[in-house]
Image (cartoon, helix red, strand yellow):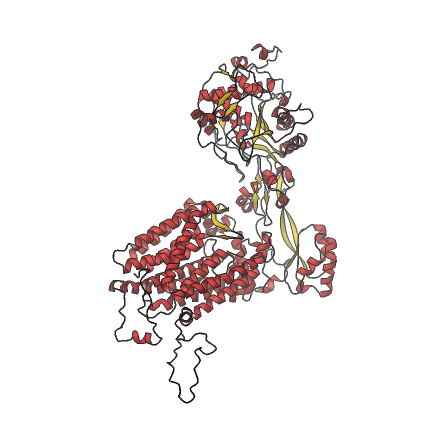
Amino acid sequence: MIGPFKTRRRPFAYPGEEIRLTGDTPSPRPTREPDASTKGLETGRLRLLVTACLFGLAFSVITGRLVQLMVLSSTGTSTVATPSEAPPLEARMARADIVDRNGLVLATNLPTVNLVADTRAVPERDLMRAIRVLPTLFPDLTSEELADRLVPGRAFVYLRRNLTPIEQQAVNDLGIPGLHFERAERRVYPAGRLVAHVVGATDIDNQGIAGIEDAFDDRLSSSEKPLRLSIDLRLQHAAHQVLSDAIDHFEAIGGAALVMDVHTAEVLAMVSLPDYEPEKIGEASEDARFNRATLGVYELGSVFKVFNTALALDAGLPLTDTFDAAKPIRIARFTITDFHPERRALSIPEILMHSSNIGSARMAMVVGPERQQAFLKRMGLLDPIPFELPEVGRPLVPQVWRDINAMTISFGHGLSVTPLHLITGVSALINGGTLHPPTLLKTDPATMPPGQKVFSEQNSMRLRAMMRLVVEGGSGRNADVEGYYVGGKTGSAEKQLKGGGYAKDSVLTSFIAGFPISDPQYVVLVILDDPKAVKGTYGFRTAGWNATPAAGRLIAEVAPLLGVTPTHHSPEGHFDATVIRQVGLKVEDGEDKHLAAR
Amino acid sequence: MTFRVVTAPAPPPPPPPVPRPVQAPAQTSFTRLDTSLLGRWWWTVDWVLLGAIGLLIALGLLLILAAGPPAAGRIGAGTYHFVQRQIVFVPVAVVVMLAISVLPVLWVRRFAVMAFAFFMLALVATPFLGANVNGAVRWIPLGPFALQPSEFIKPTFAVVAAWMFAADRTQAQFPGTLISIGLMALVGALLVAQPDFGMTMVIASVWGTQFFLAGLSLFWVALLAATGIGGAVLAYHALPHVQSRVDRFLDPASGDQYQIRQSMRAFVEGGWFGRGPGEGRVKQYLPDAHTDFIFAVAGEEFGLFLCLLIVALFGFIIVRAAVRLRRETSLFVLLAAGGLLTQIGLQAFINMASSLSLIPTKGMTLPFISYGGSSLLSTALSMGMILALTRRRAPGDPL
C-alpha cells in the first residue's frame, strides 16, 4: 500500500513509451504487485466481467419486458381517439362507503365528469368562442387562463374537474367539437362537518389523509362493502349541537364531546370543535384539523379524582376512612389547597363530593406512589390508547414518580391524557370493572373479546354511589336529568402555559357522567377549552357552571334516542344499604339521609 | 477504441526558422506534451463514457420537463418548481463530476475517505438535526434544500470498502476485510435505525459484490447470498409494509396496485413512438411520476425507442467501464470502480424493473434522470469517481 505521504511523482510516460514498456522486454519499472495478489487480480477481473454480463442480462430482461408491453400488447394508438371513448385511466374499484351504525351514509362516491379539451379537434373559431363563453358557465375560470391553456395542437388539456350534470349539459349545448368529458368520481360527505374528525378526508386522488379514511385506506379501496362505524349519526348531531352551543355561550375556544357504550367501549358520538368540512380539508386551519378528543393530551384536573377514589377502593381502604383536609399541604415549592375548603377531616365520599385536593393527595400518599402508578398503568392511562384513528395522542407521564407527582396526579395535574383515555377508563370503572379497548367500528357484543378485568364488581358499585353523590350534593348538580339518575364528576384544570407554570385565568373544564348510574349503560364526556365567566355563572368559570349543564343537556337529548327508560330511581336495590349509608345518598321516602349522615 | 498516437515531431526544416507555436492546433486544447493535471485528463479520460453520461443527463432534463409540472401542481407549488430546481442541480452535478474525474487515483481515495468520514458524522447527527418525513428521519434541512447524508455514504463507502479489501490482499497482516465488515455493520445499523431499508439493501448489495470481486471463495459467496436472501425473508415477516408490497406484487388481486397499474398502462399507451411530448396522462395520476415512476412517463410520452435508448445507455456505461478495467493492474481500482458501477446499475435496474412490474415496488431513483438534488449529486460523485478510475494510466503505475 502506498502511504498517504510517500512521494507519488513519477516521470511521465509518453504514449508509445507505455507500449514499449509493457512489451516483451522486462519492464524497467518493477511491478509492485506481489505474486499473491496477481492471482487475486486475475480473479477480480474475471468476476468483474461476470458481474457486467449479469447486468447485461438484467437489462436484456428489461428490454424484453418493454417490447412485450409496448409493442406486443399495445393495440395501436387508434384506440385512444378521444378521452371519453377511452376507458378511464383510473379504472379502479369505487372506494367503499362509510356508514354509521344504522347504515346512514357518512362518506360515499359521486360519479362526476371532468371537462377536458383536445385542441387539435377544435376549429379556431370555436376555440375563441370557448375562451369567451366558458367563463360565463364557470365563474372560477377566466378568459386569460383559458387562453393560456387552450393552445392549438394539445391533445389533452384539463379545463375543470367535477362538473354537475347541469353543467355538463350546458357545455354540450355549446356544440364545440373537441371538448370532452372524462369520467371521474368524487368523495362526498353527506353529514359534512358533523363527522369531520371521525371520518376524516381524502385528497384529490381519493386517498385517505385523515381519520377513518386514512386508517382504513387499504380496506376502503380494496372492497366495495360499506365500512360500518359505531357512530350513531343522531347522537353525533346532538353532541355537536350541545357542544357548539356551549362553546358559543361560554365563549370557549374549543371543546370535545364523547358518548360511549360502557359495555362494549363503542364510541357512539365523538365531536371535536372547531372542525372542518371534509371536502375542503385543504382550506382548514391546523387548529380545526386537530382532534381534541383523541390527539390532544390534557391535564384534566379533578375528573381524575374518580381514578384516585377507585385507587383507594382498590387498595382496600374503607369508605369511612377520614383524611385531614384542615390545612393546605406544603411540599417542596408547591402548596396544595382546596377550591372550596372544608377545613376538617373528610371521608372518601366527602373528598370526592367536595373535590378536595388536599384529601385526594393524602389518600394517594396512604396508598403510595408505586401502587398508584401500577393502577393507572392497568387502567391504560400511561400508554397511547389502542384506537382505529391515526390521530392518537401519547400521554405525558412523569419521568420519575416521586411523592409530589403522586400527590398532583391524585387531583389530575402532572399527567396528561387524551379525553378518550378518560372516558374509556371511567367506562371500565363503572361497568363492573372490565376494560375494553375503545373502538369506532360497530361491535357485536356476542362476538367481542372478553376484555380485561381491572376493578372489582363491589368497588365499581361503591364508586358509582359516590359519583351519584357528586350530582346530588356536589359540583355536578347541574347535570342531573330527572329520570335518568346521572352520576359523574366535574373537573376544572388550570391550563398549562407553554413555558411552564399554570395560567390563573384560563381553564379546561370537563364533566364525565354515566347514566343511569345505578346500572350504567352509557357514559358521556364534555370538555370545554377556556370557557369564560358569563351572565348566569356568578363570575365562575369552573366546570360546575359550564361543562356540567352542557353534559346534562346532552344526556337529556341522547337518553331517549338510546332507548333508556326514564324511571323514578331510588338507590335502594341498586346499592348495598351500608354503601348508601356510608356514602350518604338520598333515598326515595324523602328522608334526607345525606344530611343525617353528618 | 481510438488511440490517437501523435508521432514525435520531426525536426523542423531548417530554411524558414520561424518560432513554432507552443500551443497545439486549434481543435484540441492540449498537446500530448502537456503534463498538467488537465492536460493528462484530456488525453486519458474515456470520452465515449463521458458522451454516454452527457446523453443521459440531457434525457433527464427532457423528462423532468415532462414529469415535473404535474408533480408540482400536486403539492401546490409553481408549475416549474421541480424543473427550475433540477436546472440548478444539473450544472452543479456536472461540475462536481468533472472535477472529481480530474483527480489522480490516490486523491480519489483520499477524497472518498474524507467524505465518508464527514457524511458518517452527518448520518449520526441526522436524528438530532433532521426532519421527520413519513415516519423516517433521513434529511438534514439546509436552507431551501435538504441533504440526505446516506445518499453520499453510498458511493464513498464503496471506495473505502474497496480500499480495505485491496489492502487486505496487498499488505501482509493488515485486517482490511475485518475492518470492511465492521464498517458495513456500522453503516447498516445507522441506516436501519432511520429506518431506510432501501438504502441499506443497495449499500449491502454493492459491498457484497465487492467482496465477491475481491476473490471471496465461492462457498462464502453462496453463504453471503444466503444471508442476503435470509435478510429479505426476515424483512418480509418482520415488516408489515414490506410484506404488503410483496403480497400485492405476487397476487395483484389481494390489494391496491394503483401505482403499478397506472405505470403499466402508460407503457402500453406509449407504443412505438409514444403519445408525444406533453401528451402523457399517467403523470397526472402518479404521485411519484417525477421520481420513482419517471420511466413510465418516458414510455408514455416518447415511446419504446427512448426507453430502449435509456436501457442501452445504462448497459453501455457498465459494460464499457468493465471492459476498460479488464487490464487493470491495481486491485483497489478494480474493486472501487466495480463497486460504483454495481451501485449505478443496481439502482437503474431496480427503478426500471419496479415500474415495469418485474419486481415488487421499491422507491428508488433512476440515476441522472429522476428528480432530486441529493440523488443527482451522489450519482455525479459516483460517475466522477468511475471516470477518474477508468482513465488510462501507464502500466505498473500503482495508483
Please tell me in which quadrant of the rendered image residue A74 appears.
bottom right
Residue B391 vs A291, above or below: the answer is below
Position in image of residue A178 (x %, y %): 68, 61
Residue that appears at 38% across and 78% down: B5
Regarding residue A451, the answer to whether it shows in the image is: yes
Please tell me in which quadrant of the rendered image residue B4 appears.
bottom left
Q: Nearer the viewer, residue A295 or B274?
A: A295
Position in image of residue B193 (x %, y %): 42, 46
Quadrant into which the C terminus of chain A falls: top right
Q: Along the horizontal axis of the image, is A187 left or right of B304?
A: right
Position in image of residue A251 (x %, y %): 66, 32
Residue that appears at 53% across and 42% down: A215
Residue A532 vs B278, above or below: the answer is above
Regarding residue A264, the answer to whether it shows in the image is: no
Position in image of residue A521 (x %, y %): 57, 25
Count how many numbered circles sit on residues in the image: 0
Residue B305 vs A514, above or below: the answer is below
Quadrant into which the N terminus of chain A falls: bottom left
